Image (cartoon, rainbow, N blue to C red):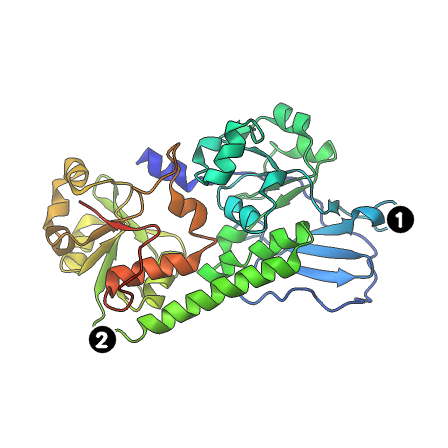
């Protein structure tokens, strides 16, 4: 199960970002180029000659916001505004989550990526080719960054994320004059909210309109799939998760991303009324009592096949979904270096995730659709 947690790939990256204390004028002189519809964690405001990027949720339970002045290169020397400044369009960037890779590629700015921690996690063939040609340098492993390498790369900006408000690892980077922005997309409450962070990258690369158009397509596809699912005549019951330690079973909370997907796919997730946006830890006996007769079992940990599941715990064979070969996993679809494609692409393309689940739960509704992430476990 160590692989499961490492693939989630939550790198604790916090910077001593300073709260903006500038005397920014209040006269917004142009209409906003983008409208944030689903995301709660960031916003952008437009002024005469610059933009202000606001990260409203930089880490869990944050009570502070971080603000950045986004300037065009020809305005940099003319402005007197104080605060953390970032010059656009970005030419060289370091990101720290595989979820950022698809957004860069959709905006056609993947060539700006020059550094990433633990590059083996990246699955995209396009970016893997750049890694193989030494155009993307490994800047650390898992939860630690090699600041010496990062400083040598000298990117225009580093995109990180954090679990808390204190971390010393990137202070040196920020003090060296390299801006660091905490990306809070993973804290969003809905799949569409997280996908909308492509507009965050649109702001940095002066590609707001492109980002808006891409997101509108994803949103339209998602809502269309949701409408199709709503016509299902049979609503299957769903179990998820697996035993992670002794007899404790981890599964998605009722307010989590997974639960939202299962709801929008018109299924009956048996723990849909539970509280929590993350994982629940429940005794095996309780899971068996409620989930034994579930029609479908989705995402049973990091297992690759049913035999592997039984080798871990013979109790898995007690479940109806296991007996009827209705166990589905995303763990088997990986890039050439082992990165799980679902973790990389899924947050940016929730429309494809939703269609996968609809194909599992209501195959008669989208007969010609080939799943992107999930497959039936053998």
Quadrant where the N terminus is found in the figure: top left
Quadrant of the image occupied by residue 258:
bottom left
Residue 57 appears in view: yes
Q: Earlier in the sequence, mark 2 or mark 1?
A: 1
Image: 339 above or below 139: below
How far across and down, in percent of the image, does residue 303 sit? 25, 40
**Camera-side residue of 266 and 363:** 363
Q: Give the residue displayed 63% in from the left and 34% down from the top.
A: 170
Q: CA distance from mark 2 to mark 1?
A: 63 Å
Residue 190 appears in view: no
Q: Give the residue displayed 73% in from the left and 69% down from the top.
A: 31
Label 1 SS: loop
Where does label 1 land, which residue? 78
As drawn, the residue found furthest toward the top would be 148
Where does label 2 land, which residue? 233
Q: Residues within 10 Å of mark 2 (few under 14, many from 20)?
A: few
Q: Give the residue displayed 28% in from the left and 61% down from the top.
A: 359
195 sits to left or right of 154: left
């Amino acid at each position: 199960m160590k692989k499961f947690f490492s693939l989630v790939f939550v790198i604790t990256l916090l910077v001593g970002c300073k709260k903006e204390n500038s005397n920014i004028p209040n006269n917004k002189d142009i209409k906003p180029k983008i409208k944030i519809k689903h995301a709660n964690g960031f916003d952008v405001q437009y002024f005469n000659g610059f933009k202000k990027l606001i990260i409203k949720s930089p880490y869990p339970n944050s009570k502070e916001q971080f603000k950045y002045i986004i300037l065009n290169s020809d305005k940099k020397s003319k402005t007197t505004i104080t605060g953390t400044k970032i010059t656009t369009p970005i030419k060289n960037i370091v990101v720290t989550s595989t979820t950022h890779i698809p957004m860069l590629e959709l905006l056609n700015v993947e060539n700006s990526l020059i550094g990433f921690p633990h590059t083996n996690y990246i699955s995209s063939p396009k970016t893997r080719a750049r890694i193989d040609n030494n155009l993307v340098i490994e800047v650390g492993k898992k939860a630690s960054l090699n600041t010496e390498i990062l400083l040598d790369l000298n990117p225009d900006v580093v995109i990180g994320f954090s679990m808390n408000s204190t971390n010393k690892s990137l202070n040196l980077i920020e003090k060296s004059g390299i801006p660091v922005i905490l990306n809070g997309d993973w804290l969003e409450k809905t799949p569409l909210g997280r996908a909308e962070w492509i507009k965050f990258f649109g702001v940095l690369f002066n590609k707001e309109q492109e980002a808006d158009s891409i997101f509108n397509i994803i949103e339209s596809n998602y809502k269309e799939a949701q409408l199709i699912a709503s016509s299902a005549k049979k609503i299957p019951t769903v179990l998820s998760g697996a035993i992670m330690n002794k007899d404790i079973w981890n599964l998605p909370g009722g307010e989590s991303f997974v639960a939202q997907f299962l709801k929008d796919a018109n299924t009956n997730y048996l723990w849909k009324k539970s509280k929590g946006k993350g994982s629940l830890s429940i005794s095996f006996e309780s899971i068996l009592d409620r989930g034994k007769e579930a029609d479908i079992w989705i995402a049973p940990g990091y297992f690759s096949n049913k035999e592997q599941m039984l080798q871990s715990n013979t109790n898995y064979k007690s479940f109806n979904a296991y007996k009827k070969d209705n166990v589905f996993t995303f763990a088997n679809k990986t890039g050439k270096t082992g990165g799980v494609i679902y973790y990389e692409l899924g947050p940016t393309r929730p429309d494809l995730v939703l269609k996968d689940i609809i194909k599992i739960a209501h195959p008669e509704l989208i007969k010609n659709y080939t799943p992107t992430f999930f497959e039936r476990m053998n």
